[in-house]
Image (cartoon, rainbow, N blue to C red):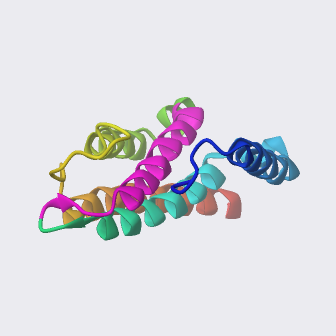
């Protein structure tokens, strides 16, 4: 990509990669993919990766690794899109967790204002970790509540 950004192979490889991801997703039954517990588990994994990538992207308050910044941004943006797919269920079934997760996402996306990284980091890695932990803790509450209901 860096050495020859206009190479035709890039578009082909990108298309092939997207198709592979879509095929992997399609293997899971739609019913499972729409369950909040499953989606939240995926979101948690993506946010853990985003948190790690963001930590690697900044040093002394500056974005020093743009690729890591962009990777972390992609994970967060996709996580928020996934959350939107279950937000109405979350509002009805887990209103307190929904409010906490939605609020944390609102703050989290502000860390990546643009795809091109700003010179100065918008937030510290500690602040990002705190927001990710808020989402993870509320995800765990939902999973525990759902597990308790299933056992009843």
Residue 54 is a magenta residue: no
In the rendering, at what x and y percent does residue 63 appear?
Answer: 23, 58
Residues rendered magenta in the picture? 61-87
Could you tell me if residue 145 is visible in this image?
no
In the rendering, at what x and y percent does residue 27 appear?
Answer: 87, 52
Q: Residue at x 49, y 52 (%)?
A: 75
Could you tell me if residue 82 is visible in this image?
yes
Q: Nearer the viewer, residue 75 or 142?
A: 75
Quick check: 113 left or right of 47?
left
Q: Nearer the viewer, residue 34 or 65?
A: 65
Quick check: 86 left or right of 95?
right
Q: Main secondary structure of the magenta part?
A: helix
Residue 105 drawn above or below residue 146: above
Q: Quadrant of residue 45?
A: bottom right
Q: Nearer the viewer, residue 133 or 123?
A: 123
Residue 64 is a magenta residue: yes
Q: How many marks?
A: 0
Q: Residue at x 61, y 53 (%)?
A: 37
């Amino acid at each position: 990509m860096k050495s020859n950004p206009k190479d035709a192979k890039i578009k082909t490889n990108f298309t092939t990669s997207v198709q592979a991801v879509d095929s992997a997703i399609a293997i899971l039954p739609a019913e499972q993919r729409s369950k909040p517990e499953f989606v939240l588990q995926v979101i948690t994994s993506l946010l853990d990766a985003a948190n790690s990538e963001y930590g690697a992207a900044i040093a002394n308050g500056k974005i020093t690794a743009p690729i890591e910044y962009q990777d972390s941004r992609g994970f967060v943006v996709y996580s928020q899109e996934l959350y939107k797919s279950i937000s109405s269920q979350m509002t009805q079934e887990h209103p307190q967790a929904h409010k906490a997760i939605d609020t944390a996402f609102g703050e989290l996306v502000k860390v990546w204002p643009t795809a091109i990284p700003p010179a100065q980091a918008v937030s510290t890695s500690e602040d990002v970790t705190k927001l990710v932990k808020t989402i993870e803790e509320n995800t765990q509450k939902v999973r525990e509540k759902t597990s308790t209901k299933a056992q009843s």
